[in-house]
Image (tube, rainbow, N blue to C red):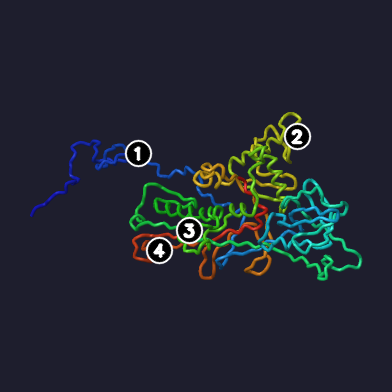
Amino acid sequence: MAITAGTNLNSVPSSQKQTLSSNYIDFTSTATAGWAQQYLPDLMEKEAEVFGNRTISGFLSQVGAEEAMTSDQVIWSEQSRLHISVKGTVITAGSTNGTFTVTSDIDGNVSGDGYTVANHGVRTNDIVLIASAGIVTQCLVVDADTAVIQVEPYDKADLTGHATGTGASTLLVVGSEYAKGTSYLDGNGSAADSRTPANEATFKSFTNKPIILKDYYEISGSDASRIGWVEVSTEEGAGGYLWYLKAEADTRARFTDYLEMAMLESVVGSNSTVVDTTLGAAADGGVGTQGLFAAITDRGNITSGVTGVNAATDLAEFDAILAEFDNQGAIEENMMFVNRATSLAMDDMLASMNSYGAGGTSYGVFDNSEDMALNLGFSGFRRGSYDFYKSDMRYLNDKATRGGINAAATSAAIRGVIVPAGVSSVYDEQLGKNMKRPFLHVRYRASQTDNRKLKTWTTGSVGAATSALDAMQMHFLSERCLITQGANNFMLMK
């Protein structure tokens, strides 16, 4: 019988106690010996958290709410304006009267959402103000059967001097005047005189659809069973020496951020047959969802600073913002979520309002003292009748998220968003009644069978065995969309 020793048998003796490459662990060399370093390093087991809290979620939880739904589509309606005001074209008609041809509603819509230029709501015997080119004329409507409204000025011969360009004039109904003993006839003098139609309340209807978000983490059974020398911790506070705990927690935290990032950035698919085919949808038939930025761009307001004054944030820009909010819902309390540069610009703007010299006036309700710590930041301010509360938005600052995108595309960078505080009253098609809801809220798919708000489950043979796979798979899924109600009260800062 012959015995054959291994070629790498650990049987080489040493006659003296000495440091050799065969009896010390090598932490730096990739040599096959692996024992070249004789000095034991001082191991710092704790993983350094060099990026602080790496998650960016939290914006929607501050300004919105979450509700369940059971459908593939969310439809909601928003009330229209109460008063009747339209844009149109003025044509002077000699010395008897003039005409006002309606071209759009006051917000510039020609048709859609229940509005047409023929359904303008202006009626015979209405008192109207027509304004354009610095002139305001009070008129009586003498015929309003069609989109061409016949008007008679009260104190002028005609409408000479008004701008005649398409949509250059604005008409506002301020009341009515009828002769004694008359009825609600259209007044055109024809044999077919009919009763002036009553104005019906109108609304605008909007829709959005949920998208399905997925992610997963996988680790083999062997790797799940071994311990590491690095002590890890997660954003949720859990920790230990099992590396897969770290990787699984990072996947979960990243997926949670995706839930918010997708609700901010998503757009509705259009003219993209490749995306439609990939996701198994008909042409432009159901891909994507309308996120916050897209909703404000489509139905809200955008500010990029005041041209010719200052592209940065200053009082001139806020005065323009206030003027636009006055044109809309005039909601007095608003939250501002901005990036760092915009936040500092606001601080500088507010600080410049103070006079620090002797005898200067200090704005606000605080009493400055030489012993008080200097605070160079502001959390909010009041301008006119509006209150603005400022908060930094990590998503717009972090280089790994929107901060990096803004740096790469400065012309399309987003500085922040102004969100109205409080709730709005809308008609819920599903419940069949008016509901009070925050202007922003997330709808997620849920029923008695399955809740897809944030669904997690484990498969594989590690832990609770569900299959023959020698691994553990952690699955994450959500199906949701963002509802932006009253987007006309929002402001996107670009």
Residue pictured at 68% horizontal, 36% vertical: 351
Horizontal and vertical percent position of residue 294? 58, 53
Which residue position holds label 4?
459
SS for tag 4?
strand
- In this image, 192 relative to 271: left or right? right
Verify CB contact (< 8 Å) between mark 3 and mark 1: no
Q: Which quadrant would residue 201 be assigned to in this image?
A: bottom right
Q: How far apart are marks 2 and 4 (CA)?
A: 67 Å
Horizontal and vertical percent position of residue 241? 39, 50
Horizontal and vertical percent position of residue 80? 71, 60
SS for tag 3?
helix
Q: Distance between the residues labelled 3 and 1?
A: 53 Å
- Check residue 275 in the rendering and tell me which mark sits there, or answer none: 3
Verify CB contact (< 8 Å) between mark 1 and mark 4: no
Which residue position holds label 1?
41
Closer to the chain start, of discs 2 and 1, is: 1
Residue pictured at 82% horizontal, 65% vertical: 188
Single out the mark in the foreground, 3 or 4. 3
Amino acid under disc 1: Pro
Closer to the chain start, of discs 3 and 1, is: 1
- Check residue 361 in the rendering and tell me which mark sits there, or answer none: 2
Verify CB contact (< 8 Å) between mark 2 and mark 3: no
Single out the mark in the foreground, 2 or 1. 2
Horizontal and vertical percent position of residue 394? 55, 46
Q: How far apart are marks 2 and 3 (CA)?
A: 60 Å
Amino acid under disc 4: Thr
